[in-house]
Image (spheres, grey):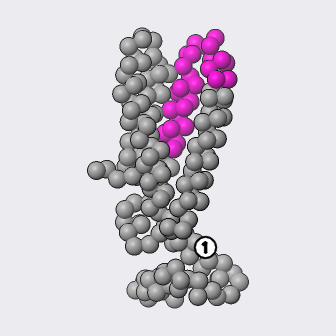
């Protein structure tokens, strides 16, 4: 219904609200409200995996998803360790839930970065990674003067990019 990008954003917003509630909670029933937001925040990873698998070329899907899962594993290992240290430090403070407010800030930063994710229009005809790679090679060619048109034709982007440049009056 929403698409991967918007589902990721909804999940990050829900996680941000969940952390704010946890950070400011002073009654036990506040924790039950967090459960509602927690269910939405668990939509982030499946949507991210789906987005990654649709924005990279088919032969790179395994590598990309492996990288995502590797990062996820690292965060699942180091996250609780670091958060536990922060919670221990916050026990004697005026606001003992400040580590959750810090997590909300990090989640908000992730939400702001999610606004840069490719949209449905960006990945309609071509893979985003190929577009980025092509732009990088074009910049490198301008510096080196070397050409590698055969590789670009294999990716199927050369004609599309030159057509776009011709329409814009560029060469």
Closer to us: 127 or 101: 127
Closer to us: 88 or 61: 61
Q: Is residue 27 left or right of residue 136?
A: left
Vertical comparison of 68 with 126: above or below: above
What residue do we see at 55% from left, 37% from top? Answer: 106
Residue 34 visible in rendering: yes
Vertical comparison of 11 with 140: above or below: above
Vertical comparison of 22 with 145: above or below: above
* Residue range of the region highlighted in magenta in the rendering: 84-110
Is the stretch drawn in magenta largely helix, strand or loop? helix
**Residue 50 at x, y = what percent?**
44, 54
Q: In this view, does 27 lie to the left or right of 93?
A: left
Residue 165 visible in rendering: no
Q: Is mark 1 on a helix, strand or loop?
A: helix
Closer to us: 103 or 150: 150
**Residue 70 at x, y = what percent?**
62, 47
**Residue 75 at x, y = what percent?**
61, 39
Q: Is residue 95 left or right of residue 35?
A: right
**The residue positioned farthest toward the left in the image shown:** 1
**Residue 131 at x, y = what percent?**
51, 72
Would you say residue 18 sits in the magenta stretch? no
Q: Which residue was labeled with disc 1?
A: 136
What residue do we see at 52% from left, 79% from top? Answer: 155
| Label 1 Cα neighbours within 10 Å, binned few <14 / some 14-19 / many ≥20 | few
What residue do we see at 62% from left, 33% from top? Answer: 79
What residue do we see at 60% from left, 53% from top? Answer: 67
Q: In which quarter of the image is residue 124?
A: bottom left
Q: In which quarter of the image is residue 82?
A: top right
Q: Count all numbered tags in the image, as a single digit.
A: 1
């Amino acid at each position: 219904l929403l698409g991967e990008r918007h589902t990721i954003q909804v999940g990050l917003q829900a996680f941000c609200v969940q952390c704010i509630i946890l950070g400011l909670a002073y009654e036990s029933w506040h924790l039950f409200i967090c459960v509602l937001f927690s269910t939405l925040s668990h939509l982030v990873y499946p949507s991210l995996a789906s987005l990654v698998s649709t924005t990279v070329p088919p032969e790179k899907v395994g590598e990309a998803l492996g990288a995502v899962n590797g990062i996820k594993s690292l965060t699942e290992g180091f996250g609780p360790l670091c958060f536990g240290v922060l919670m221990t430090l916050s026990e004697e403070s005026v606001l003992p839930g400040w580590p959750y407010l810090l997590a909300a800030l990090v989640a908000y930063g992730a939400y702001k970065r999610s606004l840069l994710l490719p949209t449905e229009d960006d990945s309609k005809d071509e893979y985003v990674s190929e577009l980025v790679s092509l732009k990088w090679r074009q910049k490198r060619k301008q510096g080196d003067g070397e050409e590698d048109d055969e590789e670009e034709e294999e990716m199927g982007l050369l004609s599309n990019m030159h057509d776009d440049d011709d329409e814009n009056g560029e060469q």
